[in-house]
Amino acid sequence: MQRRVVRLVAVGAAVGLGLGGLPAQAQAQGGAAPAARVWVTTIDRAELMHERAAVPFTTNASSGVTITVDPSRTYQSMDGFGASITDSSASVLYRLSPQQRADAMRALFDPERGAGVSFLRQPIGASDFTAAAEHYTYDDMPAGQSDFTLSHFSIEHDRAQVLPLLREARRLNPQLKIMATPWSPPAWMKTSGSLASGELKDDPKVYAAYAVYLTRFVLAYTAAGVPVDYLTVQNEPQNRDAGGGPVMGLNTTQASKVIEILGPLLRVLSPRTKILGYDHNWATHPNDVANTPPGQDPETDYPYRLLSEPASRWVAGTAYHCYYGDPSAMTALHNAYPDKGIWFTECSGSHGPNDTPAQYFTDTLKWHARTLTVGVPRNWAKSVVTWNLALDSTGGPHLGGCGTCTGLVTVQPDGSWTTNAEYYTIGHLARFVKPGAVRIASSSFGNPAWNGEVTDVAFRNPDGSTVLVAHNENDAPRTFTVAVGGHSFDYTLPGGSLATFTWPAGRVLDDGLHLLSTAGATATSSVGTGAGLAVDEDASTRWSSGAGQEPGQYLQVDLGTAKQFRRVAIDSGASVGDYARGWQLSTSADGTHWSNVAQGTGAGQLSNVDIRPTRARYLRITSTASAGNWWSIADIRLYS
């Protein structure tokens, strides 16, 4: 018999656990369910974060593909979403007339009428995206000279364009977070004497000077009206070849030596500024391994090593980029170091040399939506940040580095500006998910690797409102149900499109059911061994019976310890039609002696099986009918 492994996971998504949001007027009028507002962006640009008609919640049960939102199961808090005002971004924004520049800034940062950008990652000195004739730092010296006292330190370069834009961004969005990252320290601190290559000199005086240099930057920016919330000691520390842009190799031992000095300085002089480590890809790129100097360890486990160092007591968490690997690396690190935060801090849009603007809008929207907008926060990241805020129509100006990158907006040759896909993939988060929001559980059927289904992520805002962001990975329309508590609505998304749903805070409609944790649970079946159940809904396996349904096929779950429950949700997920035509639910205390507690006929993707309160360690779902389709289970959820 043919077998297919799909996914088995206990989703943190509670059927019947409360609809977050009745407005006061609805409560006063007898508790009518609220409506969800919805904004949609389509791949053909026909709708660009366009608000459609609101969708009312109903109490009608659905047997279709169901995204179940559970406000009671919480994950990480969110800092914000955005990009970077690089030297290039500032330069092209200053090509606009004052009125156009003001309009563009409002469209980018206004949290009510614009994209609501709430996080900026700022280069400390030059990156490859600079409009200057040469790369620079804030303490450049003639070749052969040094400045250990930092008497020549100055941020004067940034005062003309970068700092005014940052201050305006903070005025438009007072909750804006600022992160700062160097592409290279001054060349006199490096083995190569060049900004475009080399390592940090292994010299205690250099470690101290670099730590003071970074602290001076933080203090200077704060004095200029731009306080810094987060700081790293090196952008992409394993990237030693940026195509002529500033770089520096910095291994974990050297990074730790800088952090051991920098941490105490910031604690005294700028306590709001937290240090983040790594600031590089989800996995070490093969080119970075190949470019590791002879005799050096490529440190393919860099973030783990850094967090295992004593210097990690000064490190708030880890920053990641998208250019190699996949978002699951962030969940793996979270599981290893759950007390450390994770931030996602760079991923540029890009395009092929012959792509039309329409094509790379479509391609970027789809890839960023599933990988960044949804995939990144579902893997514990507290931020989602792309790269340049603005570039010109040639993808510049840049000095080395990427020649096909795109920004949130493009400044056109005629002096106008236009929005790109990144504006919407960030805007569908930033405008609606406020800083301090908490990610909450929701069942999701797509994944960053693309399986053509609907993938989503949900949040609870500080004001109690709920935000659900959903992306249809497929080119064809997909219909699904959104369920919260005993209420739900149906929705159809066009192929490739991205949508944000919001509903207000208010009285919770609670039917008394509470989701049980199934941490450590495992599963076996009559047609193979399933994967371990996990509390985190982003576990990567599903279960399927094989080529067809036959009586006697079963899936058995060991919860690890006995639990009491009165509802079992059997969810076939997005494998439409792959539900059991007939089923029987049995429970056991020891895995040997079984009691049949319920049986029934499947009617669709989601079956909620209500039973009398039962305490058991094992449960078994057995097929009692024949069918030609497979029998798939995406989620099993237990409620008390």
Image (cartoon, grey):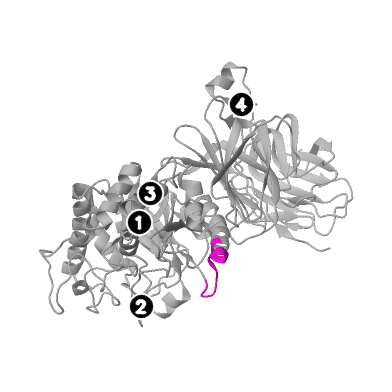
Question: Residue 7 placed where, x, y %?
Answer: 68, 54
Q: Specify whether residue 631 is painted magenta.
A: no
Q: Secondary structure at mark 1?
A: strand
x and y percent of residue 510 in the render?
61, 26
Residue extent of the magenta highlight: 352-361
Task: Check disc 3: other Cα within 10 Å, few if <14, some if 14-19, many if 20+.
Answer: some
What's the CA distance linking mark 2 and mark 1? 30 Å
Ranked by sequence position, the earlier of labels 4 and 3 is 3
Residue at 31 percent across and 43 percent down: it is 171
Mark 3, residue position? 103
Circle 1 packing at 10 Å, graded few (<14), some (14-19), many (20+), is many
Q: Is residue 237 above or below residue 461?
A: below
Which is nearer the N-term, disc 3 or disc 1? 3
Q: Determine crowd level at label 4: few under 14, some 14-19, many 20+ residues with C-alpha closer than 10 A.
A: some
Q: Which residue is disc 4 drawn over? A: 509
Foreground of the two, 116 or 13:
116
Q: Which mark is residue 296?
A: 2
Earlier along the polypeptide chain: callout 4 or callout 1? 1
Front-lying residue, 170 or 266: 170
Circle 1 residue: 121
* CB within 8 Å, label 3 to label 1: no
Q: Is residue 53 visible to the viewer in this orientation of the structure?
A: yes
* SS of the residue under disc 2: loop
Q: CA distance from mark 3 to mark 1?
A: 22 Å
* Real-space CA distance between mark 4 and mark 1, rounded to the nearest whole angstrom: 40 Å
